[in-house]
Structures are given as structure tokens and as C-alpha cells.
Image (cartoon, rainbow, N blue to C red):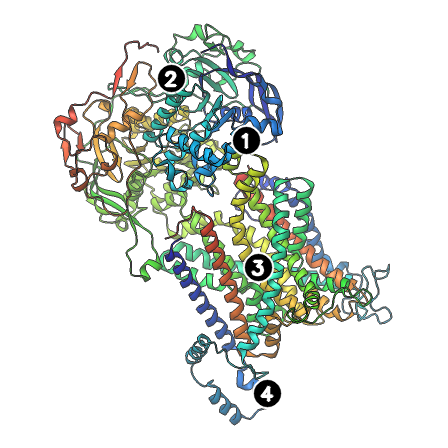
Amino acid sequence: MSLQYIFKRLLYLIITALVVSALVFGITQILPANAATMLLGEYATADALVALEQKLGLDQPAYVQYWRWISGLLQGDLGTSLRSGLPVADTVFQALGRSLLLAAFALIAVVIIAIPLGVIAAVRRGKAADFGVSMISYIGISLPEFVLATLLLVWLTAPDIALFPASGYVPITENFTKGLWHIALPVITLAIVLTAHVMRMVRSEMADALHADYVLAARLRGLSTTTVLIRHALRNSMLPTITVLALDVGYLIGGIIVVEEIFAFPGIGRLLIVSIQERDLPMIQAGALVMAFTYALSNLLADLAYVYLDRRIQYD
Amino acid sequence: MCISIGVFNMTDFMSRLLRQPHGVVGLILLVVLAIEVILGPALAPYDPETFHYSSRLVGPTPEFLLGTDQFGRDILSRLLWGARTTVLLSLFATLIGAGIGGAIGILSGYLGGRIDEVIMRLVDALMAIPSLLFALLIITVLGPSGTNAVVAIGIAFSPGMARIARSVTLSVRTSDYVAAAVARGESPLWIMSREIAPNMLAPVIIEATIRVAFAIMLLATLSFLGLGSQPPAPEWGLMISEARAFMFRNAWTIVWPGLSIAMVAITFNLLGDALRDALNPKND
Amino acid sequence: MGTQTTLTLKNYGVSYGTDKGPLKVLDAINLHIGKGEVLGLVGESGSGKSTLALAIMRALRGRVAHETGQILLGDVALHSLQGPALNRIRGKRIAMVFQDPGGSLNPTLTLGEHFRQTLARHRQLNPSEIRQETDRLLKMVDLPDTQTMALKYPHEVSGGEKQRAVIALAFACDPELILFDEPTSALDATTAVTILDLFRDLQKRTGVSALFISHDLGVVREIAHRVAVIYAGRIAEVAENRQLFAQPRHPYTRSLLASLPKAATDGEQTPLISIPGSLPDRTVAIPGCNFAERCQFATDPCRRGPIELAQDFGHAVACPYWQTVLYQAIGSDENSQMGVRLEISEPPLLSLNNLSVHISRPDLFARLMGRQPKVIHAVNDVDLDLHGGETLGLVGESGCGKSSLAKALVGLRPFLGHLELDGQPIPSVAQMDSSYRQKVQIIFQNPDLSLNPRQSIGTILSRPLKLYPGQDTGAMDDKINRLLQRVNLPPEFATRYPHELSGGEKQRVAIARALAAKPDLIICDEITSGLDASVQASIVNLLRDVQRATGVAYLFITHDLNLLRHIADRVAVMYLGEIVEIRPAHKIGLPPYQPYTEALLSSAPVLDPGLEPRRIRLQGAPASRLGAAKGCPFESRCPRRIDDICLSERPPRIHFDRGHWIQCHLDQRSLRSVPPIWTATPTSLNND
């Protein structure tokens, strides 16, 4: 893997960030009501509005405002929340940290469960195990997170059962067991949906790999079944799986938005929904940008990992 | 849904589709769904918006087959009425996405060169925004409503569809039959419409089918978040959202709409996979 | 060969389950391979030859409906082995080498790791022994730098090197038997011969037995002690190598040999004999001879059967009437007769001067960085005249630029330099008007890719008719019928779709489409390389018929030099984007030769047992084509390289007889001083 390739990919990442920021900024610009109206409410006087618009720089052309926003962004200044009056950066990064924890637990669960199950399904193709895995993954990919989360709430947090708390958040740094207890349901929801996606992909990649000529050649050299499966088929099917995992971070981000809303988990997803409902523009901009950037970054890392692992690809 | 595979042998195609278990199950579910969409309101035992005060939040009974919600509305009737909105709006959202994305993808792939490179960089950047987030942003601009949710999902789908349409265009474009058409001096219009387009149909249809499932889930999710259809519409996602406060008193208010959404999504996922296998020449 | 047999197949048969019922892929196969013997197995596509190899390895793919008979390795009954017992034999006592060396090596493992796994599994060696043994094996197959070679990944070595590594892997556990399934078919001819040399040498040294499967009779003649011919799942004939080629007995073997283009020093062009019809339907029982429907000598008893493989002094034939028909010539009236060639017109129809094709990949990033994009010089300064009514053969190995040249000539690639058609200069692709496009048509290698799968044959043929209406009047349907008739296809094909046709039929449709334009020149880009020999013969004969009737010229691009002797008037030899020699086709076997032509001729398979080729072997792989080469393109591999002049200066063109020039730094005298590539051996037998 050449340095040049990494450099090129970083350049693309910057292009992506620019396009997304312009888009997010553009969308908030088209909004019928601007920040001044929102701050002062519908019944503000025209004079007060003009004065505030001047103070916030809203009377300047859009590109000037965009430039101010972007340059602030590069200095780590994401503006101030229109609602709370707190700096956006602090709120967003605190929320992001909590969401990343959620995502990390979900991804670990997925890797531990989905990859082995996918492999088993591919190896036992057409058998009961395969059928079972396929059924579960069809249901998993067809069940929206909000349905699953609500059903889990109904069954596991009902007053007479109360296996888990229905909502809230306790930092695990504060109280580890209590923290885990609170984080369990959101993680389970995300993990189930994601497992279904990843399992499906691993199964199909592994099935392809098992059909490859080099796997037949390895079998015909009399190598043991474990060697053939692990050293030959699995090794090659893991490469596309890495890409798939990165793409699934996209689902994960979508899932996080919904799941955090349902379990009232104070992460970045809930922050975004609340900001959208309250029309807190700087908060929407920052939240959306941070999420998109996380996704783009995970794709970049996956591609780099792929290139590093697959010696065939020589990018120039 | 009409699967138009051009002049490709239709009976042969159907037999390939029916040879796979998921094709058979998918088709059966599709027929059930079609009946629900077409005849739903006629089959519904009650009006979906009539309140039955005396029987609120009851479980399944002979009178209310699937039970009632917090206002005593018949869940079965609401589901049957809602099928039309939910399914048609999802199809429509997918069509918008396939239309916009497909046009951009074909154009980009066909023109090639710098234009292609610029368009694809933009598409890549847009694809970095997860669909739900993209849809949320668009709704922020348009305001929450069922129609706006459809538009938002359609736009959010376009980059992905453009990606696929372009890659298919590129592979078809470099095929020898297109080379032969270029060499004999066919017009670009003929090449695009008669040589390339019919060969792109299959992969685009497969992708679109799978995306219908995704659209249904997204649409329901937006309604659930209060950003899609507004009460008292019998939209399935909205039904779950409205019933949440009462879920411990009657879990059926959550289970039935949830199951309905899942079944429709499963139908299109199964069909999409079956189509992919049936149209894959490797499976001969 | 000795009395001990390594492998015995007794009455072996296998059927695959299909929608139409069980398909008999192999039927009553009786074969044996003696110790130290190489048995060649020859058959066309669909004959079941690869299935036989997989059956021996117990790795049949797909739905097996029935299996009958026995497969014995020594006294081990392979057909009943399973699981660990089978795994102890695979790789240790029987090894297999596949067609595509790239596919059979795991791309994520080093070459050394492949050896480590195999050696550790079957020979229980410790790590240092494994290293030594890997080194020894890689040296055995003449790979350079064995220490670093073991650390390389498959994609880092050339196709020939990969196949050497795969062969070394097959020999790793000193097996009794190696199965080769088309091991050289994916390689260029000059590389393939070096692999055959290597195996012949190793086989002599180790005394291993082998089953060598190929569609290519020439390759089998090179390598096998005995040869079995398989047709539609049954063995048609088995004989000692020399005997089979000198006196083939089964009508199928005789037809197959007659359909192949042959090497010869010079002389008249002979027609190729095609075999009419196609493989029988094997989902129904065939009581008699399965070749009867295509056999010109078949009578009623042939169809009634049963037919046995009868032994006659080690020469087995599955045809009871072979003796009666032995002296009747193969070939019937429908095969084209050689006629008088049309006069070749002056001045040239198409004229190329300093024509080059450069391919560069657009790269936004490279442009942003202000760097020049990499340019591949696919075709370099080609000068070529093509006359009306002639066939110019263009021969070269994969990647030599012959297809890029073809694409440039039909406006699919931009070109530099001068191009004239009928004296009219065509400065660039943009100037190729409708009249140029009508006069110059192209046929591609693979009809599966060149015929739009969504269009009926009628639609496909109607397009050129509509684009270039010409003087023809009459209904479109009639014109399409006439075109189909012209290429010997029935009129009802107009309503069919490409996937309903066989490979040969599809290529006929592609020819008809080219003919519909009434062109002056048809560029045929490897149009027979995907076809079986017997189908290739019928396509070649069709092209000749068309040429005699219409006076069309062909630029016939191929990698098969022997084929050109049957179809071309002149031959142009291309290497790394340059034409290094142009010579008349009928004197193709006679010196002087450009050194690359000489190597190519030496690598061409020879079927005639009376001919022996002089051995010239090329080392290494072609040089990179990035940027323009200053000297001779062949310099890096040339066995007759002089000195640095070959590297630094472009060689001059040396003219010999009329229409023969060679681009080389060697002088006329040294070019002439080599003996002919083929010499007749005294024991030559004459037949047919």
C-alpha cells in the first residue's frame, strides 16, 4: 500500500467532508425561519429581528456565513446552541462519546456472534443450520429498530418484570454494573439488527469463497477440513466482510438515532432529534456533520485495512 | 408489481424464480400483500377512525380480531386501511430514488471522463450520510408530513441508486455488443435506449426491490419519530408511536403493526434475493 | 509400459441430475495407466474429460445421480473412499494440476505457505526441513531465486511461474499419479512449451504416472505415451501415441485430426474438415455408437449397437467397421473446396502508416498532483497495407496489441498516425463517416459478448441493413433470410435469441451481421479461439466461401500460427505493439525468420508424426509497455540478441522476397543461415 494511496483517500475524505458540510449548511439556510426568528419567537418586532440578524451576521451573503462557520469549525468552534446557550462542541462531543460506547458494544457483539454463525451457515449450506441462520437474518433485516426496541421494552421492562430499566443513562465510569444495566437494551437492539446484516454477508462471502478454485485445489491436496476452512476459505471471505462491516456502520448510525430516542439515551442521535424538533440550527449542523464524518472515516479505515490485507490490490 | 425484463424469456424467468424456496415464499407474500393493498378497505370490518369507547385496549376477541387501541379503534381495520398508504408510499419513494439516481448514474457512466469523476465524487460524499440522517435533514427543511417523508426517502436513496446505475452502465458500455454498435455508427440515442438500457434493467430492478423493503422501514421509522404521517392516519409506524404510552396495557397494539411492517419488508427482501439468483447467469 | 498399473478404471460411469433427467456424462469408461506412463486424454468441450479427472479425485461437483463401476489406485478402491482415508491419499498419492494456475493458488497466501501446508500435512516435516524441501522443489521446476520466490504472493509472479509452482506442489509428496487438466491452455504458446518441456523432464526423472487431459491434440502428442480419445462421455479410441497420430482408426479421431490446422514447411493450402452436427443428447439412452449421427460412414447397425471398445494389438477402437472405411477419405461435399484465389487488387484498400494506439487512464488525482498519467503504448508505429480480396493474418500472443489495433481500425480507440481507406485519408476517429464504417466491419472473439442478449437474431441482423441501405430492395425479412442462408443457418433463427444458439451458431450470426453491411474489409479478432476445432474448421471454411463469392478482404487476428497457413495470404507477426515481420503465408515454415517468429513457430503444436520442430525456448516475460521502447521490442527475450544496439536502436527493416520483410538488427546473411523450423523424420508414415 503506497503512501500515495492513503494520501489520495484522505483527499477524498476532505472532499466528502466539504460536500456534506455545504449540504448541511445549505439545508439549514433554506429553512423558512432563520435563527433570529427562532430566538425571538414569532411575535418579535421587525426592528429587534434586524438588530439580532446583524449581530449574528445573518444579513451577510450565504457564502460569507458558510465561510465563517467552516473556519470556526476548523478551530473547533461549532457555535453556540440557540436553545441552551452552551457551546455546541462540548454538547456534541459529550453525546458522541456516549454513542460510540453504544456502537462499540454492539460491534463487539456482532463480531462475536455474526461471523461464526455466517460461517456455519455457509459450510452447512442447505442444512438446518443454514435455514435457521437465513430465517433469523431475514427477520432481523426486515424488523425496523424502533419496532424491535419497543417490543423489547414491552417484554423486558414491564412493571411486573422490570428486567432492565426502560430509559436513562448512568456513565459506566461512575457505576460499572448500573451503567451496563442501562446500556443493555439499546445494545441488544442494535446488535440484533446488525447481526442479521453481517451474518447474511458473511454467509454469502463465505459461500463464494468455498466455491473458489483454490479451495478445491487445497482440498485436493488432502489438507484437513479445518485448514481448508480457516486458512483458505475464511481468510479470503474476511476481506469483503471488512467492507461490509464498514457499510453497516451506516445502518448502525441510523439505528443509534432511533434507539437512543426510544430508550432516552443521551447520545448524539437523541441530541439530533431533539435539535431538529427544537430547530436548534448550530446543533443540527454539528450533529449531522459529526455523524457523516464518522461514517466516512470508518469506510476509509475499512478500505485501508482491505488493501493492507489483500496483497493483490496495488493502488497507484 | 410488474417485473419487466424486456424481451427476455418470461416463462423461463418465472420457472427460475419458482425453483427457489425464497422465490416461492416471496411471491405468495406478494400476492397476499397485493390483495391487502387493493381490497384492504373493502375487507376491513370497521371504519379505521371510529372510536369504540366501551372496548378500549382489548386483546384479540371474536368481535375485534386483532384487538383495539387506546381509543377503541379496531386494529385490523386500521392495518388494512394503512396497507395502501404504507406500501404505495414506499414504492413511490423507491421510484423517486430509482428515477433520480438512475438518470444521474446512466448519464455519468455514459458521458465518462471528468464529468463522471466529478459526479461520482459528489455521489460518494452524499453516500457518507446514512439514509435515515439524510431523510431527517430533508424533513427538517420540508417540515414533517407523509408526502415530505416520501420525497425525503426518495432523495436519500438517489446517491445509492446512482452508484449502481453507473457501475452497471460502465460494465454494459464496455461490452462487445455496444462496441459493435459504436463501430457500425449507431446513434447515441439508439445505443443508450436499445443496447444499454434493456441490459441494465435486471440489476436496477433487483436493487430497487430490496430498497422497497428499506423504504418501508424508513417511512415507518420517520412516522414513529413524528416526522412522517400525522395522526389520525392509520400509518403503521405512527400506530406504534401512538400506542407506546399504552404498551404495557395492551402489547398487541405494538405487535400487530410491527409484524405488518416486518412482513412487508420480508416480502421484498425475499423477492429481491430470488430475483438476483434467478437473473444471475452463473446459476445456469 | 510395465505390467504394474497405477490407475485402473473399470466400467466407470457417472450421471448428473438435470431438469430433463439424469445426464450421462461418462459411460462405461475402461482405462488403465501403467507405472511411469503418461496417458493423454483428448476430447472437445462437453466430452466429459474434466469430469473424469474430478471423479478420480472424488471431487465431483453438482448433483450426482448415479455412479457405477470402479476406480482403483493400485489396489485401493478410490470410488468407495471418504473422509480422512481419502484425504490421506489426495495430495500424497494423487496430485492434480488445473488449467488456471492463478485460480488454484490462494491469493492471500505466499507460495511457500502452500508448500508448508502440504508438506506438513503429508510428510510431517519440521519447519527447517520444510524450508529445505520447498527450496528443492522450487529449484526442481527451474524457478529463479527460490528463497525469495517462496515469500512471494501468487499475483507477484507471472502465469508461467505460477504453473511451475503448482507443478512443484504436485510433486511435493512424490505421488504415484498426477492428473493434469488442460495445464497449458491458459498460457501463451511460447510459455506453454516450456511447461511441457519441464513436465516431460520431471516425469522421466521421477517415473510418475500421469493422466494428461487436453482439448489440444498437438499438446498431447508432445507429452503422452498413450492417447485416449473421448467423445460424448465414451472412449472412442486408445492407442500408442505414434500409432494414433500415424494411423487413427475411429472416424471421430480421423475427423478431429482433419479439422485441425497443421504445421507444414510449405506448399498448398489444404481445406480444414468440419464435423457436421453437434453432441448427442445424453439424457436419453444411446444404444449404438454415440458418434453415428455425425459420422459420414454410419449405417444402421452403428445406431443399433451395442458398440464395444475392441482391442487389436494395443490399439483399441470403439468402431467395428473402422477397417472397411479406413481408406475412404474424411470430408464430404459440404466442406468447402479449395479454389483459385481471387486476384489481389492494387493499390491497397487500407493503408496504415506509423499508426500508434496509446491508452492512458484518466486520473483526476494524478492531474491534480500535476503528474503525467501513465500511457500504455499498445500499438507502436505500425506500417501495413491491406489489399482488396486478400486475407492478412495478424499473429501474436496475449497483450501484444493486436486487439487494440483492430479496435482503432473500427473507431473504438483513438489513434495517432496515418490511416487511408481507398486512398482517402482518415485523420482521426471523428472522420470515420458512415461510408467508412460500412466498408470496415469487425467480428469479435466471443459472440456471447458481441450479440446483445436482449435482441432477437432478426433485430441484430436488421441494424446494419437499416444503417447502410445500399441498392438492395425488398422486404427486410427476405434480406435477413438471405443473410442467414449465406452463413448456413435456417431462416427460423431470425426469431430466436442468442442464448438459444450454440457457440458456433452465434459466431455465424456475428459473421452475418458483418456481411449485412456489404463491407470491403472484415476484421476478425480471434473469432475462432473460443470454439472447438471441428467448429473452428466450419467457420474458417465459411469465411473462405464468402471471400470467394464477394471479394471481401480479411484482417484475421489470431494466436494460432498453424491456422493462418490455412486461411491467410500474408502473415504479420506482432510483438509488444510492433509488427516485427510480414511474410507470405505459404512459405511460413521456411527461413529466414525474425527471431520471435522463429520462437513462435517452434512453439506451435505439430500433429504430423513425420515432423519434428527445432526447439527454441523463450525466457522471461514481455517487457513493460509503459512509455515508448527505444530499441527492438523483443530485445529482452531474444535468443539471438546481438548487443546493446538491440536495446538502444530501433532495428531496420530488411527486405527479402516480394512481400517479405523482417525488422531485426541481424544482417540478411545471418537471418538466412538458420535451418528450417521443421524437419521431416525418416520414419514418417503416410495416411489419408
In space, the residues marked 4 and 1 are separated at their CA atoms by 78 Å
Q: Which residue is mark 1?
A: A222
Q: Quadrant of residue C459?
A: top left
* Amino acid residing under circle 1: Gly
* Amino acid residing under circle 4: Gly
Query: Which type of secondary structure does the marked residue at label 1 adopt?
Result: loop
In the rendering, which numbered label is found on residue B94? 3
Mark in the foreground, 4 or 1: 1
The subunit letter for the residue under badge 4 reads A
Q: Which residue is mark 2?
A: C333
The subunit letter for the residue under badge 1 reads A
Residue A95: x and y in percent read 59, 72
In the rendering, which numbered label is found on residue A41? 4
From what the image shows, is residue C493 above or below residue B240? above
From what the image shows, is residue C199 above or below residue B88? above
In space, the residues marked 4 and 2 are separated at their CA atoms by 98 Å
